[in-house]
């Protein structure tokens, strides 16, 4: 709920998402002191960067979370402190951010349910029939919402979930337990705020997970975060980040900065082995070369020891993954999903302020094709400065240009054809989810997931791919009736009424 400062009541927090000095060049450098002085020294505030890997909080939020000079950074996260050991208000990575976020008030259940409905409607409107959430944190209440919406006859989308896990430390290997982390705290403990006329049921499990709930809602695997983000200098790179006025505003660690690995090699190997033996697919977030190397070595060691089990383990984002590393991934039959659409928004600023010429080898897609990898592309919504838009993403994969400059491709040798880009959204994506037998192509015996387009992508100039409109989207042969929507619908939605 949006309020003005005059409407703030005791117990309210300020929660802001999408801070992005890369796109808005005159934003100030944030800190607890800055937020206290310019906004509020009494109301706890959290400002999350667009990447989702960094946050800034004010002094009341630090106090509320019990963070002071004696508080150690949690495993996999960083509480930034000044030269005197005083927390600056900057927090890197989910374990540190959750120390504060888990203390914030939880949103109203009905608001959460409506948010799911409007987002799923939007996905259908741009032609998506199946999406994945690689940041799933189980909650009895959130799970109940998901299950209720997935059960509806007019559900517009199916969702594969990847449950967030933390690595198993060396001394915990025999016990098979993971690091403790703060409770996600994104939904209330009761469901009283949402009335569904007696039809709502409790989640199928006691906040453990969704499991394989249904054909439309299931856990596809688990997610580990190997390193950080290129937007805050925490991606584990081989060559240092540039240090410029912009990276200082973004809060990059002091030069020379190489980012950081969130797990030890042995902890990652232990965790991959645990889930590999269960037949569970593991997805590892890795942007920098060092993180990609750590993930590859863990997968190689586990497969050598326990054999291939068709897990189709995944690697996510892969901004600076090298050609040689992609080749090795192909030999291990890994599923690679690239975040190529960074180039559309950030190609120029990556070159001038963050990576220099390394931007030209950002997500070398053509090399994945050469290595026989069934690769996909994604937009990591919502930690991305735009709505999910498949044809925008495909345009970047085919042209490798920014949105403002169609004449300067970054790494033109790594461009792919529209055919390869379409495969990334269809047959390859289905294979990565172990759903190639019933999804991904128009074949007898598969589900009738269809998209009707205004133009044939094969006949459109690559720079005009975004002009293609989705006329209709069909899920299992049923029109979702939302394909004419061009913006996310209003939040004024009654979830008790039919979605269509």
Image (spheres, grey):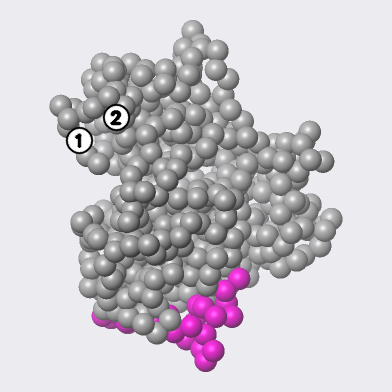
Q: What element carries label 1?
A: loop
The earlier-in-sequence mark between 2 and 1 is 1
Q: Mark 1 points at which residue?
A: 3
Main SS, magenta residues: loop
Q: Name the residue under label 2.
A: 12
| Residue sitting farthest toward the left | 6
Q: Give the range drawn in magenta.
A: 434-463
Left or right of 154, for residue 420: right
Q: Where is residue 130 in the image (x, y as percent from the top left)?
A: 45, 69
Image height of 49 relative to 280, above or below: above
Could you tell me if residue 420 is visible in this image? no
Is residue 404 shown in magenta?
no
Which residue is at the front of the view, 157 or 54? 157
Q: In which quarter of the image is the C terminus?
A: bottom left
Q: Which residue is drawn at 36% across and 49% down?
A: 192
Left or right of 127, for residue 314: right
Q: Which residue is drawn at 49% across and 7% down?
A: 84
Q: How far apart in space, not on screen, are marks 2 and 1 (Cα)? A: 10 Å
Q: Which residue is drawn at 33% across and 24% down?
A: 44
| Residue sitting farthest toward the top | 84
**Does the residue at mark 2 contact the one at mark 1 (Cβ under 8 Å)?**
yes
Image height of 130 relative to 302, above or below: below
Dot label at residue 399: none
Is residue 442 shown in magenta?
yes
Q: Where is residue 295 in the image (x, y as percent from the top left)?
A: 67, 49
Q: What element carries label 2?
A: loop
Q: Where is residue 21 in the image (x, y as percent from the top left)?
A: 31, 35
């Amino acid at each position: 709920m949006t309020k003005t400062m005059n409407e703030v009541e005791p117990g309210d927090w300020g929660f802001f998402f999408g801070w992005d000095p890369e796109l808005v060049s005159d934003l100030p450098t944030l800190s607890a002191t800055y937020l206290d002085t310019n906004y509020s020294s009494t109301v706890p505030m959290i400002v999350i960067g667009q990447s989702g890997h960094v946050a800034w909080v004010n002094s009341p939020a630090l106090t509320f979370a019990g963070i002071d000079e004696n508080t150690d950074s949690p495993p996999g996260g960083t509480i930034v402190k000044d030269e005197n050991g005083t927390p600056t208000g900057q927090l890197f990575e989910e374990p540190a951010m959750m120390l504060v976020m888990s203390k914030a008030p939880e949103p109203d259940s009905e608001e959460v349910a409506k948010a799911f409905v409007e987002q799923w409607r939007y996905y259908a409107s741009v032609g998506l029939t199946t999406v994945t959430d690689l940041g799933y944190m189980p909650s009895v209440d959130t799970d109940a919402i998901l299950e209720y919406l997935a059960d509806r006859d007019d559900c517009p989308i199916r969702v594969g979930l990847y449950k967030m896990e933390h690595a198993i430390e060396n001394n915990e290997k025999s016990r098979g337990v993971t690091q403790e982390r703060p409770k996600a705290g994104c939904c209330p403990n009761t469901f009283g705020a949402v009335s569904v006329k007696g039809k709502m049921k409790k989640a199928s499990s006691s906040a453990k997970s969704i499991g394989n709930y249904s054909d439309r809602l299931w856990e596809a695997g688990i997610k580990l975060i190997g390193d950080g983000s290129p937007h805050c200098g925490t991606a584990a790179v081989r060559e240092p980040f540039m240090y410029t006025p912009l990276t200082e505003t973004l809060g990059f660690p002091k030069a020379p900065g190489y980012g950081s690995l969130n797990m030890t090699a042995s902890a990652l190997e232990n965790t991959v082995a645990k889930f590999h033996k269960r037949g569970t697919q593991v997805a590892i977030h890795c942007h920098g070369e060092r993180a990609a190397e750590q993930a590859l070595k863990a997968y190689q060691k586990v497969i050598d020891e326990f054999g291939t089990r068709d897990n189709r383990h995944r690697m996510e984002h892969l901004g600076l993954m090298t050609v040689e590393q992609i080749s090795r991934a192909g030999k291990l039959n890994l599923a690679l999903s690239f975040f190529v659409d960074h180039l559309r928004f950030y190609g120029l600023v990556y070159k001038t302020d963050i990576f220099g010429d390394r931007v030209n080898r950002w997500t070398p897609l053509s090399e994945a094709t050469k290595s026989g990898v069934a690769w996909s592309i994604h937009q990591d919504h919502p930690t991305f400065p735009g709505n999910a838009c498949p044809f925008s993403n495909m345009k970047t994969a085919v042209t490798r240009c920014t949105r403002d400059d169609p004449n300067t491709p970054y790494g033109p040798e790594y461009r792919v054809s529209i055919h390869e880009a379409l495969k990334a959204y269809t047959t390859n994506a289905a294979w990565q989810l172990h759903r190639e037998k019933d999804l991904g192509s128009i074949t007898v015996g598969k589900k009738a997931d269809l998209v009707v387009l205004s133009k044939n992508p094969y006949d459109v100039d690559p720079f005009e791919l975004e002009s293609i409109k989705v006329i209709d989207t069909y899920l299992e042969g049923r029109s979702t009736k939302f394909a004419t929507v061009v913006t996310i619908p209003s939040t004024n939605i009654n979830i008790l009424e039919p979605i269509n």
